[in-house]
Amino acid sequence: MTGRTTQEHMEQGKDTHATAQPGARKASLIALDWGTTSLRAYLFDAAGEVIDTRVSTAGIMNLPVPAEEGGFDAAFDEACGVWLAQSPTLPVLAAGMVGSAQGWLQAPYVETPAGEDALVGGIVKVRAACGVDVAVVPGVLEPGALPNVMRGEETQIFGALSAMNATSATSAAGDSASAQATLIGLPGTHAKWAVVEGARIARFYTFMTGEVYAALSAHTILGRTMKRPAAPDTAAFLRGVSVAREHGSAGLLATAFSTRTLGLTEQLAPDEQPDYLSGLVIGHELAGLEAVLARRDVALAACAPQLIGADALCERYKLALAQFGCTGAHLVRHATERGLWRIAVRAGLVAAS
Amino acid sequence: MTGRTTQEHMEQGKDTHATAQPGARKASLIALDWGTTSLRAYLFDAAGEVIDTRVSTAGIMNLPVPAEEGGFDAAFDEACGVWLAQSPTLPVLAAGMVGSAQGWLQAPYVETPAGEDALVGGIVKVRAACGVDVAVVPGVLEPGALPNVMRGEETQIFGALSAMNATSATSAAGDSASAQATLIGLPGTHAKWAVVEGARIARFYTFMTGEVYAALSAHTILGRTMKRPAAPDTAAFLRGVSVAREHGSAGLLATAFSTRTLGLTEQLAPDEQPDYLSGLVIGHELAGLEAVLARRDVALAACAPQLIGADALCERYKLALAQFGCTGAHLVRHATERGLWRIAVRAGLVAAS
C-alpha cells in the first residue's frame, strides 16, 4: 500500500478481513506490508489464515524515532513484539518501501519480466535488534527509456493471481493465471497497471493520479472554489471521466481548467468540483492506459482487469472503466495478505498449507 | 500578466521598455495592467509612447488594505497619485483581473469571436475615491461544453496584432493581421493559445502549465530529489519535451513519474530534474495544442506563432515548438502597453497618434 494512503478521497478502506482470536490457532508467520506512511503487520496460522492484524502509522518516513537511532527496530518491536514474545522463532517477511534505499535494508530491484521465483531470489535479510531475521521482498524495475518501479505492489499482484487461481473453476493445478495475459490495476497515489504474462509481471505503468489530484486540489486555483460534497457525487465524477475521454488528446493541463470555467459559468457547483476533477484525472489515467495498451494491440475494452485497493475507490474505477467500454473489471480482496503468504511459502519460510 | 508571475522559472522578465524622463513630454493616458499578484501602471504621451512605468505587488489578491476598506483606491493612489497630482484629468484605462468578480468592478465577459469593438463596447467605469473614472476592459469568454476565459490576455493579443501591423511591410492600411488566421501564445501560469481570425479572437485554449509545474515540483514526490541547477539546463529541458512528444498519448500523469524513475536509475541527475520536468509539462502543452489545432485541420508545424511573455520563457517555447516542427515562432515585445494604448484609442480615451 506504499505511499497510497495520503489522499482523503483515495484513502485505504478499513480492513474488513475477518481475523480470528489471536492465540486460538498456532501462529506460523509474521508478514509486514511496510510502506511510506503506514505499517500493517499480519499474523498467519499454519493454514495461511490471518489470525491477527496490527496497523500503525510507523511508515518508513514516519518512524517513532529516527532510522539512525533504531527507528526500524522500534517500529518493528511496537508492531510485532507481543507476537514474538509468545513465539520467538516465527519467520518474518516484509514487503514495500521498507526495502527501498530509504528503508531498513535495500533489496535491489528485480527486473521485468519478474516471476515469483525471481522475487524470492531477490529477498534480502536484515537482523533486527531483537535477534529475529526479517526477510525483505525486492521491488520490480522495468528498465528502458522510461523506466518504471514498484515496491509492495508486486506482492499484491501475486496475491491477486493467487486469488484468481483459488476461485478459477478451470484450474486443476492452480495455475490458470499463467495461461493468458492478465491486466491488474492498483489505483491510488501512484496508480499502477501491470500486465502479467505466464505468471510473470511482463510490464507495468505508473500514473501519478492520486498525488496529482491532491496537488491540484490543494495547491492550485482549482481548489479555491471547491467545496467538499456531503456524499460522493457519482454524476459529477462520471462527467469528469467523460470529458477526459472525449477531450483526452488536449491533455490534463487543458481539461483541468474546465473545473474552474464550468464553475465561473455556473455549469458546475462548488460541491460538484472535487468529484468532477477526480473523474478528470482518473479518466486521463484510463485514456493513457488505453493508449499504451493499444500500442501492443491490446484493447482496454476487451480486458477483464483485476482491481486491488480500497473498495470505494475500486468501485469508482469500475464505473470509469465502463465508460471506456471495459465492463469486466472486478475487485480482488486481501491481495496483500495473500501475496505475502504466497511469497513466504515459495521462499520456504513456511510450509504450504 | 494576470496570475502569471507566481512561478520562479516562468517569472516575468524585467521590463526593458525604454521609458523617457517623466514630465519631459506631455502625458495623455494612464493605463493599468492589474492582475492577481501585481499592478503595472504606464504613463503614455500623446504619441502612444510610454514615458513612465510604476510596478507594485498590489495585485487584486494582494491589496495594501482589504478591498472593503478601500484597498483598490489605496493601491491606485499609491501607483498613480503622483501622475494625477500633475495631470488630474488624465484618462485611465485598466485591464486584467481588476475587472473580475473579485476585482474593483466586474466587467462581464465578451464572448468569442471577440474583436476590439466588442471589447470597447464592454468597458465599464468605476469612479475612484479621488474622483477619477477608471475604464475597465472586459475579459473574453468562449462558451461551450468546455468554456474558456481570459482577462488581460485579450489586451496583450490586440497589442501583438498592433505590433504585427506596425512591422508588416505588406500592410498599406495597417490591417494585414486580419487577412489570415494568426496563432498567439501566452506562456505562463495559465498558458493561453488564441486563434485570431479577421482581427477577432475566434477561439482559445488554456493550459495550466506553469501552475501544474509548480504544484508538481513543490507538492509531490518529484520535488524531493530535485536540485535547482546553477544555470538553466537546455538539454534536460529538450529531453523532457521530446519524451512528452513521443509518449504524449500516455499522458502527463504517466510521463511525469519518469522524472523520479530516471533519477532512481541514475539516468537523470538531481539538478537536471527541474528542467526535464519543465520540458515535460511544456511538451504536453504543445502536444495538446497540436491535437486541438489538428481537429480543425490546422497543423502546428505550419503556424508562425506570436509569443507574448518573459523573454527567457518565450525562448524556451521557441525551442520546444521547433521539436514539433514549428520553426516560425517569434517574440512580440511590449504587447501589454501596445494593447492598452490601442484599446484606449479605439475607446476614444485618447486621440490616435
Image (tube, coloured by chain):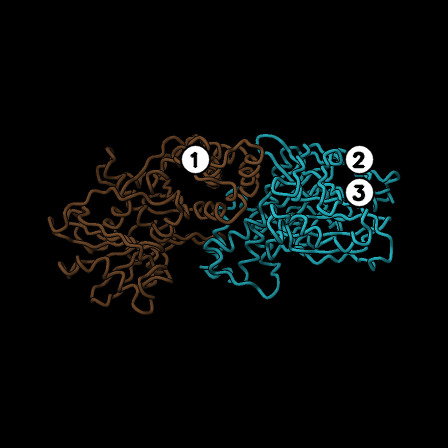
Chain colours: A brown, B cyan
Identify the residue position indicated by label 3 in the image.
B342
Mark 2 or 1: the one toward you: 2
The residue identified by callout 1 is A300
- Looking at numbered disc 3 in the image, what kind of residue is underneath it? Arg
Disc 2 on helix, strand or loop?
A: loop
Above or below, comparing residue A295 to residue B236 in the picture: above
Give the side of residue A149 with respect to residue B283, left or right: left
Q: Amino acid at mark 1?
A: Leu
Q: What secondary structure is found at the residue carrying circle 3?
A: helix
| Residue B214: % across, % down | 54, 53
Whether label 2 touches label 1, CB < 8 Å: no
Q: Position of residue A346 (x, y in %)?
A: 23, 52
Q: CA distance from mark 2 to mark 1?
A: 46 Å
Do badges 1 and 3 share one subunit? Answer: no
Q: Quadrant of residue B108?
A: top right
Q: Is residue B24 visible?
A: yes
Residue denoted by label 2? B179
